[in-house]
Amino acid sequence: DLGCFTYDPGFIATSSCKSKITYIDGENGILLYRGYPIEQLAEHCEFTEVAYLLMNGELPNQTELRDFNEEISDRAIIHESLRKFFDGFHYDAHPMSMLVGVVGSLSAFYHSELNIKDSTHRKVCAARLIGKMPTIAAASYRHSVGRPFVYPRIDLSYCENFLNMMFSRSSQNYIDQDHYIDPYLVKALNLLFILHADHEQNASTSTVRLAGSTGANPYACIAAGIAALWGPAHGGANEAVLTMLAQIGSADNVPKFIAKAKDHDDPFRLMGFGHRVYKNFDPRATIIRKTCHDVLARTQKSDPLFDLALALEEQALNDDYFIEKKLYPNVDFYSGIIYKALNIPVDMFTVMFAIARTAGWVAHWLEMMEEPAPPIGRPRQLYIGPARRDFLPKGQRS
Ligand code: SDX
């Protein structure tokens, strides 16, 4: 038993990972973080409060939350040499490629974390990653648009800080006091971060646990998780939703593309629909759907892409095939639309997912490293290659 998977050589892996962090009931659309329903956390919490819950197992009291927010804020700044790291990237590098590289390089700045000493030390690393992720993400964006780097501010909340680092018109050396950040959009971003914070043993979290099980340093483990998240079948789906909507082009074309999605000979899939675990509805999508419609109404976004998205949602939700296959919009369908309405560039969508999921990744890394002897992840396989055979010299090969 590897602590995550029990492999019987004759059968495909059946997951039996033990964790106290997140519970999912795919049939009934239930998602609990440390026992709390996602609906209640989404309605009442700030993102850092949920990050604290995932890491520590309990919601923080007022003092604990104040201290945690101060620590996260203190750790948001990045080393000046790391800021110069971005100068090495071509201007049109994908932000996810910069995120993977820069987060992985944190281990070059924090040598002491290469041999973690104890739980307190581990929690410092976890807070450092949660604090720095928005700064590195925003710096990736600023580099890609050729704008000066904006430093994190200690007077702003986690989400306000990120939006300010992304969109402030300030120059690199002083703070732009008059940059207005719409509280409603901050609230929408806070909700998105909470909904994306953790999701049990998804592909990227399993990657973090697998890398961590070898004793690799936390920055390398989180960089591995970022890389796994990037794929369009996983965290890259929100970006793929917008690409798909652009491919569909107009609401008139929706029936044609729904037919393509049903055709097994056609590789086209409806991005943002379906889920490995939820065979009913994704509770996060139910929560986020209302916010999506509210944001579109509030920002009066007249982008035809939004009308197309709502038409696709409507037709897919009422299509017999999708109903029979239990294919519902997942969290990524709506998050991509909200990010676009928040003027987040499409190639930053998966970066947004990574910022939020860092809370879950570090919580799982902490949980695993707390085990007395974390079992190294060494999955076995079902061998389907050729039977034993003897070597043939080149001249005898056909
Ligand atoms: C995330 O693991 C996590 O928790 C991930 C995540 C998280 O928070 O970490 O929730 C985030 O990754 C959400 C998923 C984002 N991905 C996408 O939106 C990409 C589009 N979705 C598909 O790639 C797909 O739905 C998967 C990969 C998500 C799930 O694929 P499965 O496990 O094959 O889905 P299934 O077994 O329920 O499929 C049932 C049928 C199959 O057809 P049959 O073989 O039965 O004839 O539905 C088909 C599938 O081919 N199908 C789709 C489809 N998804 C499944 N057909 C058209 N469009 C789709 N999107």
Image (tube, grey):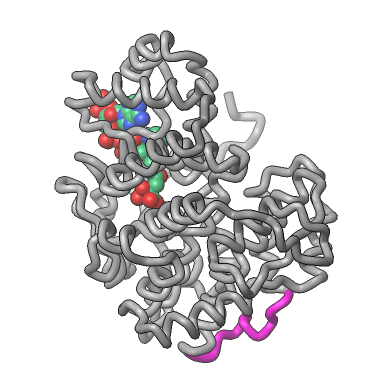
Left or right position of 126 against 17: right
- Residue 99, compared with residue 79, is above or below; it is above
Q: What kind of secondary structure does the magenta stretch mostly adopt?
A: helix
Left or right position of 320 against 61: left
Left or right position of 65 against 327: right
Q: Position of residue 314 (x, y in %)?
A: 30, 23
Q: Position of residue 145 (x, y in %)?
A: 77, 43
Name the image quarter holding residue 139: bottom right
* Residue appearing at x 59%, y 68% in the figure: 156
Q: Quadrant of the N terminus?
A: bottom left
* Residue appearing at x 59%, y 85% in the figure: 115
* Residue appearing at x 64%, y 72% in the figure: 76
Q: Position of residue 175 (x, y in %)?
A: 76, 65
Confirm whether the magenta stretch covers residue 113: yes
**Ligand 1 quadrant assignment:** top left
Q: Which residues are magenta?
A: 109-118
Name the image quarter holding residue 219: bottom right
Q: Closer to the camera, 278 or 194?
A: 194
Q: Is residue 217 visible?
A: no
* Residue appearing at x 53%, y 76% in the figure: 127
